[in-house]
Amino acid sequence: MLVVDLHCAHGHHFEGWFASADDLSSQKERGLLTCPVCGDHDVTRRPSAPHLNTSGLKERVPTPFRGTSQAASSSVPSTGAVASAGSARPVHDSLPAEAQEAMAALQALYLKAVRHVVENTEDVGERFVEEVRSIHHGDAPERAIRGQATPEERAELAEEGIDILSMPLPDALKGPLQ
């Protein structure tokens, strides 16, 4: 099992688990490796320290990791890799530690909100605009739905008095949740 630190071009840091280094390379080449936060395919491996067995040390060495255990509670499967986007890792290395922790906490909260929406709505896909109009006019049963709409379609719905919420959904969360 190979566990690596990854990051996307937008600065989101996450962890990936792979069967081997070849599996990591294969998934990257096939475009299966994506950021669980923004869906970016420009994902690169970060340097990471190997596991060191320090159980024989007499004095315990404090770790520099300053995360919160609450934020690290969930993981998202991402096309064969397990991406732990909720872990409190620095999002932008140039920010102060407090800002890094706040960014990581916000990222974890965003993913929690997106997961809640996915779990509690019906995906109607490209039929979203027609379905939301049908619900609004009483032609379809009222229920929570999600789907795709262009910016123009969203503007038309707003003009008709139909309120919707736009929420980017990372590709990793579009599949089955585990």
Image (spheres, rainbow, N blue to C red):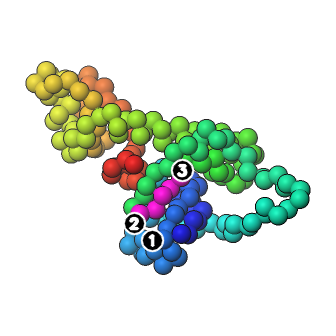
Q: Secondary structure at mark 1?
A: helix
Q: Say left or right for 62 vs 90.
A: right
Amino acid type for the residue under numbered disc 1: Lys
The residue lying at 57 percent from left, 65 percent from top is: 3
Q: Residues within 10 Å of mark 1 (few under 14, many from 20)?
A: some
The residue lying at 33 percent from left, 49 percent from top is: 176
Q: Say left or right for 110 vs 116.
A: right
The residue lying at 26 percent from left, 22 percent from top is: 161
Mark 3 — residue? 85
Q: Given contact means CB atoms under 8 Å apart, are the residues at marks 1 and 2 in contact?
A: yes
Q: Name the one closer to the observer, 110 or 23.
A: 23
Amino acid type for the residue under numbered disc 2: Leu
Task: Reply yes or no: does residue 81 show up in magenta.
Answer: yes
Q: Name the main secondary structure of what is drawn in magenta.
A: strand
Mark 1 — residue? 28
Amino acid type for the residue under numbered disc 3: Ala
From the top left corner, tell me how far across and down residue 22 is, in percent: 48, 78
From the top left corner, tell me how far across and down residue 121 is, in percent: 29, 34
Residue 71 drawn above or below residue 138: below
Q: Say left or right for 1 vs 150.
A: right
Mark 2 — residue? 32
Instruction: State which quadrant residue 139 falls in.
Output: top left
Q: CA distance from mark 3 to mark 1?
A: 18 Å
Residue 106 drawn above or below residue 6: above
- Which of the marked residues, 3 or 2, is nearer the chain's N terminus? 2
Residue 57 drawn above or below residue 144: below
Residue 107 drawn above or below residue 52: above
Q: Residue furthest right?
A: 59
From the top left corner, tell me how far across and down residue 31 is, in percent: 39, 68
Q: Residues within 10 Å of mark 3 (few under 14, many from 20)?
A: many
- Identify the magenta region: 80-84
